[in-house]
Amino acid sequence: MAKLISNHDPFHIHKILGLFVLIHFIHRFGSLFRTGSAFTIQEDPLHATVCVILHGLLSWSSLLLPLPVRRNFNAPLIWPEFRLHSILFATRHVLATVLSLNDLWPSDLLIKTLLKISIVVGTSKIATYITVKYGGSKEKRTTNSMPYPEWATEAQLAYCKMGYSKAQFMASVGIMYEDPFMNFAPLLGIQIAPLMMTLVRKNKCDAMMVHRIYSLALWIVHLGAGVQLYTSGDGETLLIVGVLTAMIMKGRLEYGFPTWMLWTFHGMMSCYFYPLYIHPFLKSFEEIKYLRFLSLSFLVPVLQQIQEIIDDPRPTIESVQYWPLLKLEQKHYDKGFLLNKTPKTTCVKTY
């Protein structure tokens, strides 16, 4: 049984930062669900900024630890490509959060919009470069080639992988919001994944638990975003951004349009044309205040999944992508339940 504390981190820099980050996540999300605000106006921006920067330092400090050169496709373990992707995307959200906390975005609307687009598109380009240099395959990417149980069907795998892909889209959408929490929230999924992979390497959990906890983190972010939008009362922004996000998801996943084109379109519409022209027009209608309740739509998929669990005591993998509160094992299913069962799973391109 491998120990959690090893000599790979002799000064315990990475461990101390990791412990702080976990406590900080609990504090921020707890504050949001308790008071409706993760970053309160009473808090000193400098204090909040330092706390967020430590998240970035945690990701960068992972470079102090040795890794195997090649990826292990039989277990969810950290490899160089994944680590660099994790650092890259964590840095993106730390940067955006710091800019929002300190009101450092450019005052010119067009320049601010172009900066946000540049952050999203630039990150995507760097991630592609990392994949080419360290991954060796554009098909077997970080999430769509994660190991899954052998008894999972192709339909179940496609559902789960699509959920992960959508979460990645929503993380990028969070950059477009000029809101500290919306910028910050995706860090939970980004930084919980390497923690769970480390626990697998230490023999503290299995691959199934990685999916459960990672999915739980994504759902917490999902609910947190809904709470933030509801308390801000900005339902019309949710309506516009939701429509735009659905459009670019379809454009990328189904039609394969270039990433730069889709995010440029999304950024210009949501960050420039919407606040300049659409938002003032919508505000002229008294009924617009009721759009605030659109944020409650974030609860709909959660309630649907809970209803599925109530209706079927043997939920499938589709129940919130490995429902993290249930122990799903192959023995829970009868022989006629799993169709098209294959001994090995194949990797499919989901985005």
Image (spheres, rainbow, N blue to C red):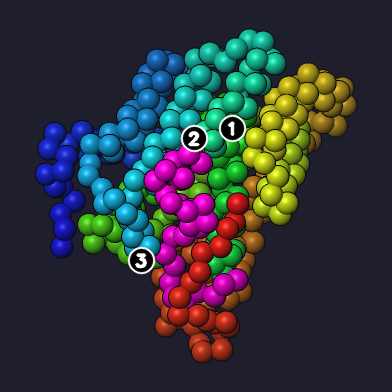
Q: Amino acid at mark 1?
A: Val
Q: Is residue 87 visible?
A: yes
Label 3 SS? loop
Q: Earlier in the sequence, mark 2 or mark 1?
A: 1
Q: Position of residue 302 (x, y in %)?
A: 60, 56
Q: Amino acid at mark 3?
A: Asn
Label 2 SS? helix
Q: Reply above or below: 68 against 1.
A: above
Of 7 and 276, the residue lying toward us: 7
135 inside magenta stretch: yes
Q: According to the image, label 1 marks what residue?
A: 121
Q: According to the image, label 3 marks what residue?
A: 74
Label 1 SS? helix
Q: According to the image, label 2 marks what residue?
A: 126
Q: Earlier in the sequence, mark 3 or mark 1?
A: 3
Of 25 and 317, the residue lying toward us: 317
Q: How busy is the neighbourhood of tag 3: few (under 14 within 10 Å), some, or many (20 plus)?
A: few
Q: Is residue 185 left or right of residue 207?
A: right
Q: CA distance from mark 3 to mark 1?
A: 32 Å
Q: Position of residue 28 (x, y in %)?
A: 43, 34
